[in-house]
Amino acid sequence: MKKILLSGFVAICGLMNAQAINAGFEQSEGYTVGTLAGQSIWGSTANAHTTVVSTEDAKSGIASVKMTPGTSTLAGGVISTTNYIYAPEIVLEFDFKVNAAAYQTWWMVTPQDPDAGSVVGRVVLGADIDELLVLDYTGANGALAYTEIGEIAAFTRDTWNHVKMVMNFDDGEANYYLNDVLIYTGPVVAGTSAVGNLVIANDNYDALGAAFVDNVRLYDSATAGVNDIKKSAFSVFPNPTADFLNVATKSKVESAQVYDLSGKAVNVSVSNNQIDVRNLAKGSYVVKIQTAEGTSTQKFIKK
């Protein structure tokens, strides 16, 4: 494994506010196919062309963000913001897929504080070893250094994987999960207590392969309606839907609540594992399902 510093990157950041963020990159959310920079909450500088909204693949819906390597070592810049989430515990989640052609390229995902400083280590998608790494403050004198986590952090190419980072500012710890398995615990940068933006960076190491990112969520863990309390197997269909959303689960749906992307509850009716969404405006929503197995959430689109 090469422990190298990235020679160049393209960085994009989402301007975060105090509400939960749920970016699925769908047309219903205002996104169009093409360069992500300049769309919705996202901004960028150099090499923005390597990060685009694409309909080639998606974890849910029909669109995601496609990240491709660049052909130069030109460094990109981030756009910070004074809008932020300030909470004792903040969670970042996203789905990713690295395709079979990716070689040597690394992609990083990291939250920053409102002044564009580091909050925690950076999650690195290591396409040369098929494992997640963390660029964390474990080097000499607290400098950034790559931490190889090992086999527990291995991901499968051409398959959607899920990353979750739980940042606890009271405990000073950040827990990193891959597909719901704890793979690493690292420090939260001393003196930080908020997240101001989110960076997705490309190291531009070669011109092969691509990675896709979908369902990017950043939220206060105490916020009702968008925080997964417990994962339980269920799916919703059809998705997108114009009238009714069916819930496929082993257990009877005890309750269901739907939230818009700001975290506000909206009125729906539930009957026999079916949710009536006919009165909802077009757009993306999060449904929280409670069964005997537990509580879980999933995004859907009202068309």
Image (spheres, rainbow, N blue to C red):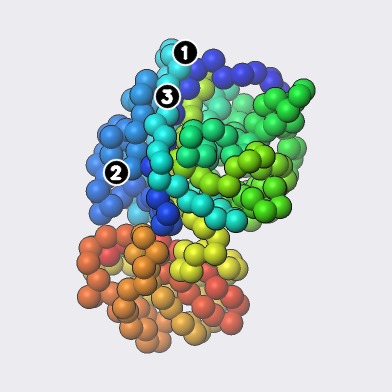
State the residue at coordinates (71%, 42%). Answer: 186
For the N terminus, give its image quadrant.
top right
Question: In this rendering, would 271 be left or right of 145?
Answer: left
Q: CA distance from mark 1 to mark 2?
A: 27 Å
Quarter of the picture holding the C terminus: bottom left
Quarter-of-image position of residue 131: top right
**What's the residue at 36%, 68% (across, down)?**
264
Q: What residue appears at the point 48 percent right and 35 percent down from the top-left corner?
A: 115
Identify the secondary structure beneath mark 1.
loop
Relative to 3, say whether 14 is above or below. below
| Circle 2: residue type | Ser
Relative image position of residue 4 (x, y in whole percent): 65, 18
Circle 2 sits in a helix, a strand or a loop, which is it? loop
Residue with the most extreme front position: 191
Q: Amino acid at mark 1?
A: Thr
The image's mark for residue 73 is 1
Among numbered discs 1 and 2, the one appearing first in the sequence = 2
- Residues at discs 3 and 2 in contact (Cβ within 8 Å): no
Residue 40, label in figure? 2
Q: CA distance from mark 3 to mark 2?
A: 18 Å
| Residue 77 badge | 3
Residue 93's x, y, as percent? 52, 50
> Hey, which residue is sitting farthest right in the picture?
140
Between residue 42 and residue 170, name the one nearer to us.
170
- What crowding class fits label 3: few (fewer than 14 Cα within 10 Å), some (14-19), or many (20 or more)? some
Q: In terms of sequence position, does the residue under pointer 3 or pointer 2 come before the other? A: 2
The answer to whether the residue labelled 3 contacts the one labelled 1, judged by CB atoms less than 8 Å apart, is: no
Q: 79 or 296: nearer the eye?
A: 79
Label 1 crowd (10 A; few <14 / some 14-19 / many >=20): some
Q: Please say whether residue 73 is visible from this viewpoint.
A: yes
* Mark 2 closeness class: few <14, some 14–19, many ≥20 residues within 10 Å: some
